[in-house]
Every structure is written in structure tokens, then in C-alpha cells.
Image: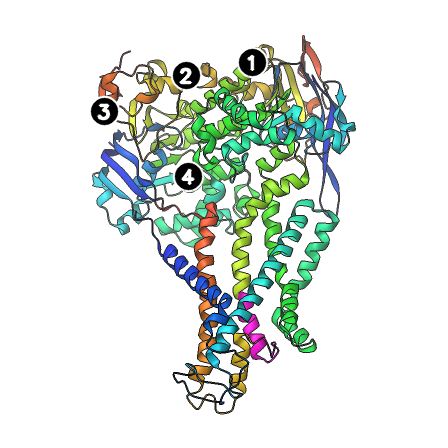
Amino acid sequence: MTGVTVKDVLGSLGLGILVILVAVSIFAPQIAPYDPHDTYKPMEHPSSEHLLGTNDVGNDILSEVIYGTRVSLFIAFTVSITAIVIGTALGLIAGYSGGVLGFLIMRIVDIFLTIPRLVLIIVIAAFMPRSIWTIIVVFIIFGWVMTARIVRSEVLTLRSQYYVESARMLGGSDLYILWRHILPNVIPLVVVQFIMEASHVIIAEAGLSFLGLGDPVARSWGTTFHYAFECPNIITSDVWMWWMLPPGLCIVATVLGFTFVGYALEERLNPKLKTVVGMGV
Amino acid sequence: MMMRISDLKTHFPTPDGIVRAVDTIDLSIRDTETFGLIGETGCGKTVLGLTIMRLLHPATTVEGEIIYKGQNLLEASEAEMRTIRGREIAIILQNPTTSLNPVMKVGEQIAEAIRLHQGLNKKDAAAKAVEMLDAVRIPSPSQRANEYPHEFSGGMKQRVMIAMGLACNPSFIIADEPTKGLDVTIKAQIVELMREMTERKAMLLITHDLSVARELCDRIALMYAGELVEYAPLKGIFESPLHPYTRGFLGSLPERGLVPIPGMSPSLIDFPDGCRFHPRCEHATEVCRREHPELVEFNAGHFVRCHHARS
Amino acid sequence: MLEVEGLTKQFSSGIIKKRNVSAVDCVSFRIEKGKTLGLVGESGCGKTTIGRLILRLVEPTSGTVVFDGIDLFSLKRAELRKIRPRMQMIFQDPDSSLNPRMKIGTSIAEPMKLHDTVPKDERAQKIMELVETVGLNPEHVNRYPYQLSGGQNQRVVLARILALNPDLIIADEPTSSLDVSVQAQILNLMRDLQKKFNHTYLFISHDLEVVKIMADQIAVMYLGKLVEVGETPDVYNNAKHPYTQALLSSRRILLEGETPGPADIPTGCRFHPRCPQRRDKCAIEEPEPVEVGEGHYVACHLV
């Protein structure tokens, strides 16, 4: 029994990727060779001056991708943290109190779940001013739903556990029970939910920006991708290799990073999932 | 002799270490007797049943011999085992709620076992299934055969499990806690039914419930920490128990005064040195801490594993 | 100490045709201070519901429960919360009675914190005291419930309850998930604690043998109704109701059939379809409790 599993290896790999990406976005001004809005000679091929060349208006692509990390991760984290906090709070209320309030929350959840999320996001984003705040708000509106549902069903199970009942017997108030006994036991689920939401937002945001609905100033990876795609002859020439591939790889790496971490955490945080080697029946 | 188990060891790896669930068991079961294997949670008794059926995880290591009708089951091929399971040796599992397929009619589940082993056609197998339900005294069996497990009460499900186990007329039955979780009055019914149904068969009854063992068994063995500590005919165990664990076990029964055994059973990963029971034994001496006692025949047919066995 | 009078709980069932199903039907008993009443019955007979009704974890349909002179059913939420520490419950599954993410010590300290019964700087010492009282080791304090055995966790539950110094303890099958040798340890501990702290117990169990040892009085329940109540030796040695007689396993009386669900309660005496001694009258008329000896009541037409 070595104790190191495939899960641990993948988990550390994922964590490594995320740490690097976060570091890149924090230190973007120090790392990036140029300001992404400065213009140079357009459509340069990679050279020692511009490692990934320049785009159609002459921005340095490497700098754009580095700053894009900032935009993409900022959106991903802001959306998922807010959505998860809202979802957890509503899920706790719905699961614990039941009653009219719980009923109402769950019906709203049901309505949201029947709406095709991405389609509606595209429609809304198309009518709103193009800014990262539009994207963040739209994603939050749809992001809390699954969490609320999952948290609620977990709370329903936890509520009938003897230790919750005995906390009530000890004279604990509802708020105390929620805070001390129920919340700590839903945290693992919430963490996993957060990771899933974050990687979902990365992809969805890239898609939205790719369609041209992103912020034209604060360029995320998706936006970079969008402008590259609008450029004529992008596929037939070699240009895609330094203009489209880098932001695309960044998106893939981020999603993989989140997925690996989520995969490794899921079991670690939930003792119930711990697999027992031995009995086959 | 129906079955002879010798030097049997079943070990399996876990992240915490090797679990020695069965750590040297020798016993033999005669043609029509019911042999009771008594032990508490985590003593390894369920694993013994699964070892006989060869239903263990591939990572498990099994050593020793299980001779059934002259054949060593541990050397039998998987194909041979499939014909033995159900047909020759049947297992009646605890917890019928999870042992029955919830989306399959009860009659079909019994018929499936019959068709698998006896090559009957669908119609005959279905008729046989109804016959079995009748034999375990389920009222209006032909109608009940078309119902799903959730329409059966706990006691009725346990009857179905017995019907399933006995459907192919096996000669050896392993019953693992067949009365667990049943109400007192239902338990009495099931015990009565088991007595009738297994009268001319060999049975290994695995249980923690001495009252059930007392009703059904001819001989009883007590298992503690992976090994047998005492075995004897029914009377010998109840009237003149020799091992301190057996005495403690009997004494902790409510009807015998509820005198507890101090401490708790050791984990199957890490046994105490010497006698495995010595940390909980009031008679333990130096030799008990040092030397692991052998199972010796104290009286005719009454075996005990204790340095200080006395009557 | 505890007086239960005409306690009834009905659940409504069915979506289209609403029907009232009684889980507990007009149950009355009393327990003196420092004594134990053993409530015996099979699964689904309503014995657990009685425990929950008394503690108002479930709201009753009718009846009264008077605890130490206080009518519990007339209390408001805030008043109830104040009195709850005096009445505690032990559940049948010790492993899920403790928060899996709380260390044992934290769990034991919880009631002290909630009610501020012990000053902060004395809590650690008090925890150690309690740990010793229930027979655990000091090192257990820093472990988690999953690292302890079922028996040890049930000791933790007892330690936690003792921190509140309650008057009434309702124990709902406290040892049904434990092995016999561990069961004996826990039951002995409960008896010792009762002697020491003069607790009043309502001991709920399916096992008449266990109840015989634990209880001063026995109440036998079948399908929501008490069928026999009396002092332990009277009920045990001189059981009058056929159901009680069958529960005493040593008598080897086999009952036919199974207990029907609370949704289809038989007419007349509820027990009559399974009763080996039934008569025509039993199917028509419901028997009233009759006093057959001092404090020994039986609801059966045969007595």
C-alpha cells in the first residue's frame, strides 16, 4: 500500500495547472512583454520581438493571451463563488425550512432547469451592453440553480440524521443547527460544485465571446479566438497556429485543471465515497 | 462428511493493512447436521461463508482446503463453481431488501435460479417457483409470484430468500444471519420454517443470535478474531462452556444476567500476541500473553482453544 | 415525573381519499421519578413515535403529557427550548447520533456551550470527567466518530447527555445495533448512571428480555395501543395478554401471519387475526383495559 493513487497524481497536476494560471493572471503586467492594447506592425509572424506574433490590428498576441487569463479566471471565479454562495444559501433554506418558502424556491429552481441555459444566455447577452459585467451577471443568474437543488437534497437527508435531532434536543436554535451541524456537512458537496461550475463558466464564457458577445476591451481567451476567427484566411495560412491555438490550449488546460482537482477532491472530502478494497460482494 | 475445511486462511488487503478475516479455521460438517457459527460483528464469520462460495474480491488470498464431496472447492475452476453455486451449495443471505432485484417479479427471480441449474423451460420453472413459494408458506403463492419485492414485508422477503436458496434442492446450505432485522414473532416463524426446510440437509448457520442457533443447530462453534475458539454439540456449549469467551458471551445475554465482557473485539488487522482473547480475559496469565493456544479436544467432540480450559 | 394521558397521533394518508391513520392511539402511562418504564413492541407499532411525541419532535393529535408538573403540549417554542435540556433522547444508531465532522470532545462540549452550564475554563476538565464517567479513554476526545466503535459512540452520546444533567431520558432501542457483549456493557452503564444521577428512563425496545432487566414497569404495545401494562415481575411471570405471551420467546408460541400496517387496523381487538386464542367476540368488540392485579392492566376479552 503505497498510499499514492492515480487520483492523487492527477489532483496535484490539476492543482499545479491552476496555481500557474492564477499566478499568471495576478502577475500579468510583470510577465507580459507588452501592453495588450499597444499596437505594432499588424500580422507579424512569431519572432524574438513578438513571440506569438501580432494580430490584425497589431496587438502582441502573447500579451493578449496573458491578460486574457486574467479576464477568463476573473469571470470564472466571480461567477462561481457568487453563484455557489447564493445556491447554498437558498438550498439550505429550502431544505431545512420546507414550508411555503422552500416550495417557492424549488419551483423557481424547476423553472430555471427547464430553460436551455446557453441559448437564453446568448439571447440575453446579445441585447445587453457588451461588457464582462454583463457576462458575469447573466452567468450568476443561471449558475446558482444546480447548487441549490443539490444542497437542498443533501439537507433533507442530513435533517433526519439523529445528530441533527439530538442537537435540537440539546436546545439548539435553527440557525445554530444550520450553521454548526448542517453547513459543515454540505461543504464538501459545495466545493465540488464550485469546481464544476468554474470549469463550466470557462467553457461557456469562451463560447459566448467566440460568438462575439464578449467584452471587446477586456479580452478573454474566447474574445481573442473570436477576432482570430473573423480574420480572413486564418485557417488556410499558418497564422492559426500562434493566434488561435494558444488561447484554445489555455481553455483546455484550465478546464482540465479544474476537472482533475474536482476528481481528486470528491473522494477526499466525502468519506462515504471512500472505496473499500477487499470484499467483492 | 459433507464438508471438511482445513487450515483455511482468507486475507485481503485494505489501505490500513492486511485484514485476516479468516485466520486458520478447521472444521467439518456432517451430512444432515446444522452447524452454527457464532460470532460478533467483525469476527470474520461472513467472510467464511463467502470463501466457501468463492465469492470474494480477486485481491483476496485464500489458503488451505475446502473439501466438498471429495472435491477441493479452492481448486475448482470458475465454471465448475458456477454449477456448484445454487445447485449444490446455496447461500441464504442476510438483508433480503438488497438481495432481491427490485424491478423483477418475485416468481421470476426464483424461476431464474431454477432455469439456470435444472434446464427447465420457462413454464415449468415458473410452476416450480410457485411451488417453492407455497413450500415456504407464502399465502396465495401463484398470485404473489407475480408481485414485486416491495410488495412483500420483511418476513415474507426472508421466506422468498429461503425459497430461492432451496429451489434447486442443494445438499449444502449456508445461511448468513437469516433472521437479522426481523421482529420477534416473525423471527420465530422463520426459525420454524428453516428447521422444517433443512431437516435432511447440511447447513452452516452463521449468526450472532444464540437463541436462533439454539433452536436450529446440532453443533455450535464460536468464532473470535478470525479463528474458532470453541466448538461442541449444542448441549456442551450451553451447559458446560469451556472457553472464557463463550462463557462471557453467554453471560452477557439479557436472560443470563447481562454481565458484559470488558473491552472490545480486536481488529482483524492487528491481533494481540498469544491468545487473541487474553486482553479481555479475567483468567489470563503469562502463558496466555506469550503463546497462541491450539484447538484441543477437551471432551469427546468438545474442542477448545484455551491454555486454562477447565470444566 | 412523567404522565402520559390519552396520547394519540394520527397521520393522514392517501392523496385522493384522505384517510386518518393512527400510529399511536390513546396511550396512557406514568413513570415515577428515578424509575424505568420499558415500552415493548415490534417495528411499526408506534413505540418510537411515542418517544418523539413526548419530546415534541412530532406534534400530537390529542392527549396530554405532563412532565414534572408542566403540561408539555401547551408550551410555546421558546419555553419548549428552555425545557428540552431536561429531557433527552438516545437513538438506536450511535454512529449517526454524532456529527461526523466534530471531534468527540467538541460533541461532548456542545451542550455546555449551548447552555453555558460550565464556565469556559472548566470545560476541558468537565469533559474529562464525563469521559471517565462513561468509561472512555481521555485520548478518545480528539478522535472522530468514525474512528470509534458503535459501543464507544453510544458512550459518547451518554456523556453528552450527562453534561446537561437531564431528568428524563428516552432511550429508543439504544443497543439494537450493537453486539451482545457490547450491549451488556452499555445497558450496565445506563443502569449505573441511573442509580448515580436518579434519571427517569423511558426505555423503548423490541426485546422483552432486555426490558425485563432494565425496567421497573413494562408496557407492551401492539399496533398503536397498549395491550398490557404492569410491574416487570407481574408482566414477565404472569403475562395475561396472548401477544405478551408470544413475545416471551421462551414460551415458544408461534403466531400466525404478520402485523398489518397502521392503515388497515383490524376491527374489534387489533390482535385478533393473529391471536391463537381468539373468540367470536374479539373480531367485533374492542377490549378495554382491565386491572388484573395491582397496577397490572390488560386489554383482552379473555381476562
* Start-end of magenta stretch: A200-218
Mark 3 vs mark 4, CA separation in Å: 33 Å
Instruction: Choose the circle earlier in sequence order: 3 or 4.
Output: 4
| Above or below: residue A60 compared with residue B88 | below
Element assignment for label 3: loop
Q: Comparing marks 2 and 3, which lies closer to the viewer?
A: 3
Mark 2 vs mark 3, CA separation in Å: 24 Å
Instruction: Choose the circle earlier in sequence order: 2 or 4.
Output: 4
Q: Residues within 10 Å of mark 4 (few under 14, many from 20)?
A: many
Residue at 65%, 56% (x, y): give it. Answer: A86
Amino acid under label 4? Leu
The image shows residue C219 at horizontal and vertical percentages of 63, 19
The image shows residue C8 at horizontal and vertical percentages of 73, 29
Provide the chain ID for the residue under circle 1. C
Q: Residues within 10 Å of mark 3 (few under 14, many from 20)?
A: some
Provide the chain ID for the residue under circle 2. B
* Contact? badges 1 and 2 (CB < 8 Å): no
